Image: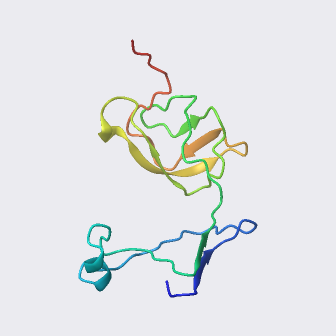
Amino acid sequence: MLKGSFLEAGTLLFPFKGNLKLELIGSLDTAYSKKFPKFVSGKVIQCELCRMSIHGIPKMSWGKAKSSMIIKGNHMTFETPLKGWVVKDKIVITTSNFNPDQSELTQVAILSSDGFELWIRDPSQYVHSASRIMYG
């Protein structure tokens, strides 16, 4: 960012609703990276006499399942509402066993108005259990 400039994406009253991508392009072969080799990877955001302000819509980053999803299922219920989630959001349904390959990337197809129920775009390839396992 240039001296005295600012970057603003949304405000507290009017949050940014789209996707924001900051792409850092740099090289290790710069005067700054040579001056501070321990701290610089070639890509930095430096703010000198400026302001960076980024405000998005508050969104719950994860939800605890209340119901399980069967193979080829597409519906789950949650213990708390999925605040801020919208149709077409990309989500990961994590594995409910010890095989990380059984986590699934999908999209929200339908979300109930209260946020407690979710239908996904693609049928599940694996069982995703909502049961709690106690050890010890």
Instruction: Please name the residue shown 55% across and 34% down the image.
Output: 64
Q: Is residue 44 above or below residue 135?
A: below
Looking at the image, which is closer to me, 125 or 36? 36
Provide residue 39's location: percent of width, then percent of height. Answer: 32, 67
Q: Is residue 119 above or below residue 86?
A: above
Query: 39 left or right of 46?
Result: left
Provide residue 22's location: percent of width, then percent of height. Answer: 46, 73
What is the quadrant of the C terminus in the image?
top left
Looking at the image, which is closer to me, 52 or 22? 52
Identify the colour scheme used: rainbow
Provide residue 121's location: percent of width, then percent of height. Answer: 50, 50
Badge count: 0
Query: 134 left or right of 97?
Result: right
Looking at the image, which is closer to me, 30 or 91? 30
Instruction: Please name the residue shown 64% across and 67% down the image.
Output: 17
Instruction: Please name the residue shown 43% across and 37% down the image.
Output: 72
Kindly indicate the quadrant of the structure image that contains residue 134.
top left
Instruction: Please name the residue shown 49% across and 22% down the image.
Output: 131
Provide residue 71's location: percent of width, then percent of height. Answer: 42, 33
